[in-house]
Amino acid sequence: MAVWDRKILWGFVLLLAGAGAQSVNYPHPVCAVKGSTVTLLCSFTPVKSVIRENGREVPIVIVRVVWCQNHEICQGTTPSVYDSESTNNDRRYKYLGDKKGNCTLQITDIQKSDEATFRFRMEANDTRGHFTDKSGVKVTVTDPVRMKITSSSADGEMRGGESVTLYCTAVCTIHQLEVTWFKDNHVLSESGPALQLSPLTAKDSGNYTCGLKTNNRTVSLPYSLHVEAEGGNMSLIVGVAFGVLLALIALIVVLCIIKRRRAADKGHRAVGGETEQKHPDNIYSNTLIVAEEEEGGQQPQTSRAEDEISYASVQFKQKKQARPAEEAEDAIIYSSVAGRG
Ligand SMILES: *[C@@H]1O[C@H](CO)[C@@H](O)[C@H](O)[C@H]1NC(C)=O
Ligand SMILES: *[C@@H]1O[C@H](CO)[C@@H](O)[C@H](O)[C@H]1NC(C)=O
Ligand SMILES: *[C@@H]1O[C@H](CO)[C@@H](O)[C@H](O)[C@H]1NC(C)=O
Ligand SMILES: *[C@@H]1O[C@H](CO)[C@@H](O)[C@H](O)[C@H]1NC(C)=O
C-alpha cells in the first residue's frame, strides 16, 4: 500500500519535473548611480528529483547558491561575489534569497567595478541539479551627477485640484532609486523617484529639488511649481454643468406639465366636466375651480398655486423615469471633471 502510494507520488513529481525544467528569472538590465543600493530581484526553479541508475526516482535539494560577475557558469577559479559556502563574502553583497526559489541579491554602495553581467548558479545534492542561467543581468554604474527633475506637466503652472508627478532622474533610467525630496529646502517624507502631488492646492507651490539619499552633492536644480488657488476655470466648468442640469430638469418639468394639462383637458371633454370623481386629478381641478371662484380677481396667485400642484404631482409621479436621466447627467459631469484631473 505505502509502496504504491509512493510510486504514484513520485510519478506525479516526475511529471512536474518534466513539465518545467530548471530556470532562472533575472531582472531587466539595471542602471545604478555609484554609491547607491541596488536589489537584483531574482527567482529560480530547481529540478526537484532525478532518476537513479536502478530506475528509482530520488528527490534532490539545492545545497549551494552562487552569484558571480562576468563568468558564464560561475565555476572554477572565478571569484564569486556571493557563495553560500564561503565564510568571507564581501559584505556589500547580501543574499536576500533562499535555496528554494528566490535568488535576490542586494548590492550596497555600488562601485564602478560592479559594472558587469551578474549570473546565478545553483548546486544540488546531485550534479544533475547544478545549473547556471547564462543570460544573467547586466548592471551599469554611472557617476553621481546632479539629478534632474522632470514633470508630468509641460510647465510648472498648475491649478488647484489638478495633479502633477515629479520624477527624479539620473543619466540612465534607475529603478528602486532612493532619493530625498525637498520643497523650499525642507525634506519631504517621500523617498521614491516619483513624487505625486494630488490634488494640488496653493500650498504645494514652491521650489522642488531632489537628490540621492546617499549623496547630497547630487541634488538637482530647483523645479518651480506654481499652483493657482482653487476656483478659476474649475468652478466655471462646474457652474456651467450645474446650469445645464437645472435647465434640463426645468425642461422635463415643463414638458410634464404640458402633457398633464392636455390629458386633463381631454378627460374633462370626455366625461363632461365635474361629474367624474374617481380620478385624483379631477379633485385637484375641482379645488382649483373652487379657489378660482373664491379668489375672484386674484388671477396670478391662483395660477401659481396650480403650477405648484402640478409640479408636486409631476415630481412624485415622474421620479422613477426622471432619475436615470439625472444620474446619467451626473456621470457626464464626473467624467468631464475626471478628464481634466
Ligand atoms: C538530497 O537531499 C534530500 C534531502 O536531504 C534527500 O532526501 C535526497 O535523498 C538527496 N538526494 C540525493 C541524490 O542524494
Ligand atoms: C525574494 O526576496 C526578496 C527579498 O526578501 C523579496 O523582496 C522578493 O519579493 C522575493 N521574491 C519572490 C518572488 O518571492
Ligand atoms: C523659487 O525660486 C525662485 C528663483 O528661482 C524665487 O524667485 C522664488 O521666490 C522661490 N520660491 C519660493 C517659494 O521660495
Ligand atoms: C552633505 O552631507 C555632508 C555629510 O553628510 C555634510 O557635511 C554637508 O554639509 C552636506 N552638504 C550639503 C550641501 O548639504
Image (tube, grey):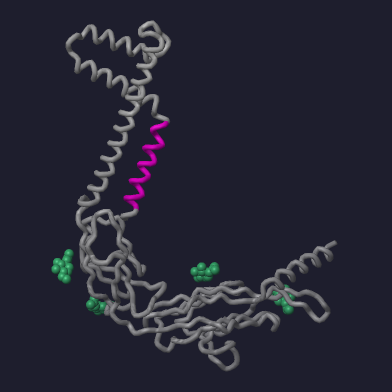
Question: Which quarter of the figure is the N terminus placed in?
Answer: bottom right
| Residue 244 vertical position relative to residue 307 in the rendered view, above or below | below
Q: Find residue 38 and report its image quarter.
A: bottom left
Expressed as whole percent of the image width and height from the top left, the position of residue 305 reads 25, 18
**Residue 138 visible in this rendered orientation of the protein:** yes
Expressed as whole percent of the image width and height from the top left, the position of residue 295 reads 20, 9
Expressed as whole percent of the image width and height from the top left, the position of residue 206 reads 20, 64
Nearer the observer, 280 or 128: 280
Image quarter for ligand 4 equals: bottom left
Nearer the observer, 70 or 331: 331
Which residue sits at x=29%, y=32%?
250
Mostly what secondary structure, the magenta segment? Answer: helix
**Magenta-colored span:** 321-338
Which residue sits at x=23%, y=75%?
221
| Horizontal side of residue 341 vs 110, given as left or right | left
Question: Which quarter of the figure is the C terminus placed in?
Answer: bottom left
Tag count in the figure?
A: 0
Which residue sits at x=31%, y=78%?
215
Q: Is residue 45 magenta?
A: no
